Image: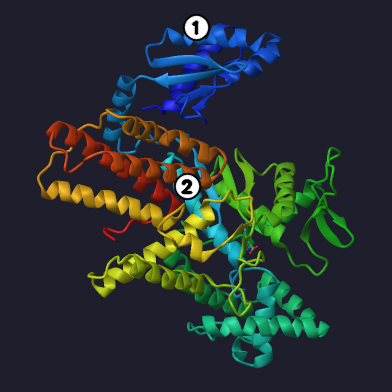
Amino acid sequence: MSALGAELSAIAAAAFAAEGLSQSFGQVTRSDRPDLAQFQCNGALAAAKEAKANPRAVADKIAARLKTNSLFAKVAIAGPGFINLDVTDGALTARGAALAKDARLGAPETGRGKTIVVDFGGPNIAKPMHVGHLRSAILGDCLQRLYRANAWTVVSDIHLGDWGLQMGQLISEIGHRGIAPIYFDANVSGPYPAESPVTMDDLEEIYPAAVAACQADEGRLNEARQATAELQAGRAGYRALWKHFFNVSKFGLDREYGSLGAHFDMWKGEASVDPIVGPMIEDLKARGIATVSEGALVVHVERNTDKKEMPPLILVKQDGAVLYGTTDLATIIDRVREQNPDLILYVVDQRQHLHFEQVFRAAEKAGITGKAVLEHAGFGTMNGTDGKPFKTRAGGVMKLFDLIAMATTEAEKRLAEQGIGADYSADERADIAKKVAIATIKFADLSNYRHTDYVFDLERFSRFEGKTGPYLQYAAVRIQSILRRAAGEGHAIGEPAIRSPEERTLFLQLLSLPDAMAAAEKGRAPNILCDYTFTLAQQYSRFYAEHHILSEPDAAIRASRLGLCRLTLAALVKTLAILGIEVPQRM
Ligand code: ARG
């Protein structure tokens, strides 16, 4: 089934075409003055400008054509040439019935036959995660869910930072401490112990100590660089140590991301493309794409249209170590070989924009992108109420676990205030609090356009009123409970119908779910879905306030209202699921 907005746009596009104007002017959207009309088409103004005609006259001609279509209850021209449109209740009802029968709720099929690789998460082994990684996890996970819902084949990859200087720093610090001499013994080439000589907690202590040592002492920094280069060159003991770091970290990260509900199809990383890096460099050198500059091997990516300075992408440093951009380039080769994607989306902090621009240009220059479009979906920072990047009270970097724990405590407090779950088991209460906490964090993040920095105000975002995750969960839970009671009282559920303005408004919103999903995909913008869901919940609550549902004496009317409740719930649950928010059974 087609989305209503798309259907109306196609009709308007045909009207423009019939007047010899471009179809692109036929874009129909929900009206921003719902008191005047349901939909609007502003294309006549731009079309008139292009054709050097009078906008009102163009609007008249388009309107005359639209009036012949029985779908419209109203076609009216406003102001200089806006076309306002209403659809008949009959047409809305028929489309509502079709929507209610469609398990996908009319989700667009933009991705049918297409593959996307979503690169998100990107934590670094040993280095603690920061709020940038948190945003990447929330946004990236939401985008992968959205793309799946829109029928794309999605492969997500965490792309671990596991190959840089921090690895050499860890190795040389462990060497200094004499914790595990066997890995440093040049006379030993394995096998090495299966058990890791360090735990996750050890790494968290060793890494900052190593960084401090390198800062204080140039000699230590050189050792760390040397260790990095030897690791990358394949020294067996270092590789074995690295494997332990990887496993220990993966175990910890798996739990952190798991608690957030974020999933990765692949746990690859910078190191995983190591076998590709050597041949890639040889090939780029042979084809003259990579050249030597000041002792380093680089790819020049500047273009004469550049307004800003565009430094070359460095592939190999003077000391032989490969860099972040080198592994990113090799990862493109790997993905094109393995997934042959149509799109690779990098959900990474906006501050890395230059890096991606360099990598994308180098990839295009090298001709390694296959059919893939490469795109950086950047985002701004999550700030504390002080306007600075979000930190713990002690001023440290907030870990994901700590953030979730903090939000859970807040959720417990809120639930108690609302008297929710007082008579539930402690387990169920804890489960609800956890789900509310995750909803608080995710909705706060996703409801802001990704490029804007935002202030994470836990007090505000954990409220059950206002534009928050918990409000939406609660709205869905209340509908669930009505439907449970209806089932308990043996009431039938029928096809939704329009008998009042509130029902009509709700219908229009339900029918525009596919348009919202398409728009969110187009802009890589989960905030569009957040707005959609919030509006839906508000409109439902107006409908609920104005109508009897379970207490409605007329069985047919009651059944159709229950049908509308059920469809609203389905749309709420679906959009929340895309946002990565679970709805508790009851609250
Ligand atoms: N590890 C990187 C960081 O912490 C993020 C990785 C993003 N993905 C990528 N393909 N570069 O900044």
How packed is label 1: few (under 14 Cα within 10 Å), some, or many (20 or more)? some
Q: Indicate whether 586 appears above or below 394.
A: above
Quarter in which the N terminus is drawn:
top left
**Does 436 sit left or right of 160 as displayed?**
left
Q: Residue placed at 66% from the left, 64% from the top? A: 387
Q: Is residue 247 left or right of residue 1?
A: right
Numbered disc 2: secondary structure: helix
> Within the displayed image, which quadrant is ligand 1 positioned in?
bottom right
Spatial separation of the CA atoms under disc 2 and disc 1? 37 Å
Q: Is residue 545 left or right of residue 532?
A: left
Most foreground residue, 546 or 447: 546
Q: Quadrant of residue 149?
A: top left
Mark 2 or mark 1, which has the lower sequence index?
1
Would you say residue 192 is visible in this rendering? no
Quarter-of-image position of residue 108:
top left
Name the residue furthest left: 490
Is residue 66 at all visible to an observer of this figure? yes
Identify the residue position indicated by label 1 in the image. 64
Badge 2 local density, few (<14 within 10 Å), some, or many (20+)? Answer: many
Q: Which residue: 88% across, 57% down?
A: 293
